[in-house]
Amino acid sequence: MPTLKLNGLTVKKEKVWSSNTGRACNAEMIGDVIGRKYTLSCTWPPLSNEQVAVIDNAIDSAFFSVTFLHKGERITRTFYAGTPTYPVYSYVDGVKTYQGVSVELIEK
């Protein structure tokens, strides 16, 4: 896997709320937190076509295992990928060079 760019990983620990969550008549929030799931925002630096293919292959399956560090702890979970973005940096001799790839990985 290509190395993420410097500061290229943002870890979010999102609350999952119960289906009865919402605002009551008095505008107070009601509901219950039923779990917490990670979202990883990943950004890579400029990449070759071959490096982009490695990332594409890694996130192509519906679900896949990811290991990351959070607060000094090594965590492994099952994720799926959001829609990746591929900003094109240049075309040299008809070959694309990507400025980087960005994708959000959402815990299953």
Image: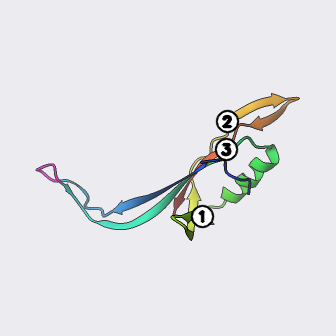
Tags 1 and 2 touching, CB below 8 Å: no
- Residue 64 spot, x, y in % from top left: 63, 65
Q: CA distance from mark 3 to mark 1?
A: 18 Å
**Label 1 sits on residue:** 68
- Residue 106 spot, x, y in % from top left: 52, 58
The first of marks 2 and 3 along the sequence is 2
- Residue 34 seen in the figure: yes
Badge 2 marks a residue whose secondary structure is: loop
Q: Write down the quadrant of residue 76 in the picture.
A: bottom right
Residue 42 in the figure: left or right of residue 46: left
The verdict on residue 61 being magenta is no
- Residue 91 spot, x, y in % from top left: 80, 29
**Label 3 sits on residue:** 101
Q: CA distance from mark 1 to mark 2?
A: 25 Å
Q: Is residue 26 above or below residue 14?
A: above
* Badge 2 density bin: few <14, some 14–19, many ≥20, Cα 10 Å: some
**Label 2 sits on residue:** 87
Task: From the viewer's side, name the closer residue of 45 and 17.
Answer: 45
Residue at x 78% of width, y 49% of height? 51
